[in-house]
Image (cartoon, helix red, strand yellow):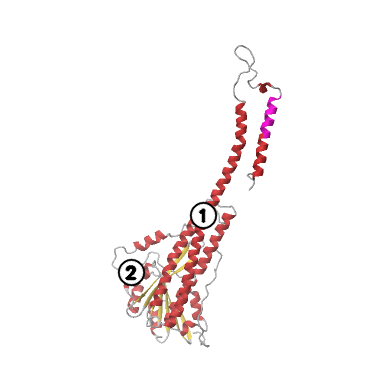
Amino acid sequence: MSDLNAGNPQPATSTPPTAASAAPTVADDDEDDDKMRSTSVSDRDATRQAHSQGVGARPGTLIIPDDALPPKLFLFSYDANGFDECECSSYDELMQRFRGQPERRHWIDVRGYGDVELMRRFMQDFGLHPLQMEDVLGDYQRAKVELNDDGQLFLVSRMTEFTSQLEIDDDQLSLFTGSNYVLSFQDDYEDCLDTVRQRIRSGYSQIKQRPPLYLAYALTDVVLDHYYPTMAAIGDYIEELENVILRGRPNKRLLARILQIKKDIVRFRRLVYPEREKIAELLRMPDEVVSEEMKVFFRDCYDHAIQALDLTESYRESVSSLIDLYMSDQSNRMNEVMKVLTIISSIFIPLSFVVGLYGMNFQRENPQGGINPLNMPELYHPLGYPVLLGVLLVIVTGQLVYFYKKGWLTN
């Protein structure tokens, strides 16, 4: 157990974090590009997976995904004086610790879904609705909040990360609130919630001083704050794509990258927009469910969701401008190629005329043996060929000087 807490409560504030790591770069090798999305799951594939689970089954049927991880059970028990933290080896141990401290508040953290019987026991002991547990195990629900008849809240959030494979990876976080507990479910062992865990472990924390709904707020707030590193990484990547275009070094994969990041931004917007609606619905709930004191904190979450949406819209416009910039650059490159070809053609047009003119087969002698004095007499001059080459050289030189003065031979 930690040391006793001391000090007067202070208002909790949250600041959007900065990007934890550098954004992926576009200066990758072609081999890395080929591997870029070898393990990714597209929106269409994810939707297909979501709809394929339990198609035709009775509503409320619990179906465990084939790749679900074995559950790990963590329990944080805390009050104003301290906390206990435990990774429980069994459900019975978890419930024994939970029920043995009814005066404390608890965070039951379940990571991994790979045990349907365990999920059923949670349903039975905590009074969870089968449809809500089905949403938990479905693992592809949009952010939402539901109010049960007993005043219990069911909240869903999407945790995001911009991965090194240049894609947005998101995981579902499901929360149930009770009179003295928050029950959370997620499908992965790794998450972005370590900040909340450290706050509980610290000597003083607002979480220990306030009701369990404050813990649900803190978890939601951390998820929202984690959108900012994701957006910062996307912004850095967009800026690098723009620099590649402006430096005049686009490659054949650049347009595909631009279109992919545009798709990721649209997908990210689909994750953030329901989060805003979820928080707005929490703010509309009666004070008996969400007190006015807690609504102050959720309004802060609402502001963060609005900011994330604004950034998303800004980046979406930036990517659209990036596509226009790429197409303009390609058009300019084509114009440069056409300019070079036109200059070459312009140089050879008069040369071809002169050479073609003197290539006409006019005979010097007529059939009667006489001389035709007007049939290109210069062809038979001793200096006719050198003079012709000189004329051609003068024509080419004059054209090059003219093109140079017009600026057609310079960038």
* Residue under label 1: 324
Q: Is residue 392 magenta?
A: yes
* Callout 1: SS: helix
Name the residue furthest front: 374
Q: Which residues are magenta?
A: 383-394
Query: Are circles 1 and 2 on residues that touch, CB within 8 Å?
Result: no
Disc 1 to disc 2, how far (Cα)?
48 Å
Residue at x-position 52% and y-position 52%: 327
Query: In the visual, does 41 lie left or right of 388?
Result: left
Name the residue furthest right: 383
Residue 301 in percent (x, y) is at 46, 75
How many neighbours does mark 1 have within 10 angstroms: few (below 14), some (14-19), or many (20 or more)?
few
Q: Can you say whether 373 is above or below 96 in the image?
A: above
Q: Is residue 154 visible?
A: yes
Query: In the visual, does 88 lie left or right of 134?
Result: right
Residue 302 in percent (x, y) is at 45, 74
Toward the viewer: 75 or 244?
244
Question: Which circle's residue, 1 or 2, is located before the other in the chain?
Answer: 2
Q: Amino acid at mark 1?
A: Asp
Residue 130 in percent (x, y) is at 32, 72
Query: In the visual, does 125 lie left or right of 36?
Result: left
Q: Is residue 93 visible?
A: no
**Which picture quadrant has residue 171?**
bottom left
Q: Can you say whether 355 is above or below 401 in the image?
A: above
* Callout 2: SS: loop
Q: Main secondary structure of the magenta part?
A: helix
Q: Is residue 387 magenta?
A: yes
Q: Which mark is residue 190?
A: none
* Residue under label 2: 62
Toward the viewer: 73 or 347?
347
